[in-house]
């Protein structure tokens, strides 16, 4: 009788212990274990170990011991996934582990207004895992450029400014290849036919569009400015575009951060294929990253008789257009008087 009582007590204690353990496991799996009010993002680098993930989660997880238990039970600790992951308020450990295993969330990557590949690399590196060094190396890879019929000078034209969805842990080479596909998608048969009809190829369109965009920030004026340059180009004139001189000057001095507001006569003598006051040909590549509106402005340039334009001092941001040199010189004198009055010497 005494032995039966002992066995019964042991059985009851065992059931209590099992219940406590089961409750602990249940709460470890299904009880909320995050304590913040807004969604958070964590980034797990390529090649990261389990401790790196723990360190990233530490500020957001209330009970790291219970998370660790479930992560190990589910095999996550030995199978880390790289990427960007969204952590939501009130998630339990099971949801956290599932999010880290399968929830690599795309980032919305944007870029525009980049002057050089180096600037683009810096902009992209701020949004994905790849650093600027690996990106610029990928952008300038001679084998890749040759395979895709691009020179290094033309390479910036491959990157069409827009918003794209891709994973944070996208490599430099993957990003570059994605942008090449987007370039091909953008340059449809219809756009290529339009380029051919105006006597340009897509890369020349992008180069001319970069000049147009540098000349005017007003999207509605870009087709008109493009028309001026197309008139010059079709009539065998030099483009005589100030932005190309500024680019040539920066390229020669390698002082890319220099702000130049005024082109001087001595600048027009810079011997560079980008200097359109010296060379008749369209420059060897874009002097700036043209956006889609500028590319479309060239493809659909305004058909008019203007060959000249200068900044309109009475309607800032826009320009005065002229059909002949005499009219242009009058407009130009007004601008020169204004800029001298402002004290702008460079």
Image: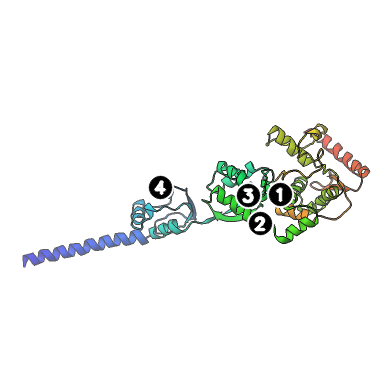
Of labels 2 and 3, earlier in sequence is 3
- Within-10-Å neighbours for mark 2: few <14, some 14–19, many 20+: few
- Within-10-Å neighbours for mark 4: few <14, some 14–19, many 20+: some
C-alpha distance separating marks 2 and 1: 16 Å
Which residue shows up at 66% across the image and 54% down it? 183
Labels 4, 2: front one: 2
Q: Which residue is mark 1?
A: 290
Answer left or right for 235 relative to 297: right
- Within-10-Å neighbours for mark 3: few <14, some 14–19, many 20+: few
Q: On the image, which quarter does residue 335 sit in?
A: top right
Of labels 2 and 1, earlier in sequence is 2
Q: Nearer the viewer, residue 316 or 138?
A: 138
| Disc sitting over residue 279 in the figure | none
Labels 3, 4: front one: 3
Coordinates of residue 317 in the picture (x, y in percent): 79, 47
Q: Which residue is mark 4?
A: 49
Q: Which residue is mark 2?
A: 184
Labels 2, 3: front one: 3
Of labels 4 and 2, earlier in sequence is 4
C-alpha distance separating marks 2 and 3: 14 Å
Q: Assign a secondary structure to mark 3.
A: helix
Query: Relative to 23, does residue 109 appear above or below in the rendering?
Result: above
Q: On the image, which quarter does residue 328 sit in?
A: top right
Answer left or right for 213 relative to 88: right
Name the quarter where the C terminus is drawn: top right
Q: Assign a secondary structure to mark 4.
A: loop
Q: Nearer the viewer, residue 149 or 66?
A: 149
Labels 2, 1: front one: 2
Q: Which residue is mark 3?
A: 147
């Amino acid at each position: 009788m005494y032995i039966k009582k002992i066995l019964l007590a042991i059985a009851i204690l065992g059931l209590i212990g099992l219940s406590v353990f089961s409750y602990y496991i249940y709460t470890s799996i299904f009880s909320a274990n995050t304590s913040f009010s807004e969604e958070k993002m964590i980034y797990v680098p390529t090649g990261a170990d389990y401790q790196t993930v723990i360190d990233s989660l530490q500020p957001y997880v209330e009970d790291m011991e219970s998370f660790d238990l479930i992560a190990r039970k589910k095999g996550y600790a030995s199978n880390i996934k790289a990427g960007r992951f969204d952590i939501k308020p009130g998630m339990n450990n099971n949801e956290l582990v599932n999010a880290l295993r399968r929830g690599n969330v795309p980032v919305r990557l944007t870029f525009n207004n980049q002057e050089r590949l180096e600037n683009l690399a810096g902009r992209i590196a701020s949004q994905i895992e790849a650093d600027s060094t690996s990106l610029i190396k990928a952008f300038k890879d001679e084998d890749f450029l040759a395979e895709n019929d691009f020179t290094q000078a033309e390479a910036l034209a491959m990157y069409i400014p827009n918003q794209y969805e891709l994973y944070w842990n996208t490599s430099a080479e993957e990003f570059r290849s994605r942008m090449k596909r987007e370039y091909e998608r953008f340059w449809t048969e219809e756009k290529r036919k339009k380029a051919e009809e105006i006597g340009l190829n897509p890369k020349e369109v992008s180069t001319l569009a970069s000049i147009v965009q540098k000349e005017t920030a007003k999207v509605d004026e870009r087709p008109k400015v493009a028309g001026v340059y197309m008139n010059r180009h079709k009539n065998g004139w030099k483009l005589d575009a100030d932005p190309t001189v500024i680019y040539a000057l920066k390229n020669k001095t390698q002082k890319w951060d220099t702000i130049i507001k005024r082109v001087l006569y001595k600048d027009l003598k810079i011997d560079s294929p980008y200097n359109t006051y010296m060379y008749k040909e369209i420059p060897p590549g874009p002097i700036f990253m043209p956006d889609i509106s500028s590319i479309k402005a060239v493809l659909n340039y305004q058909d008019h008789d203007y060959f000249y334009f200068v900044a309109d001092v009475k309607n800032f941001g826009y320009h005065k257009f002229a059909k002949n040199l005499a009219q242009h010189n009058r407009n130009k004198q007004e601008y020169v008087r204004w800029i001298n009055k402002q004290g702008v010497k460079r």
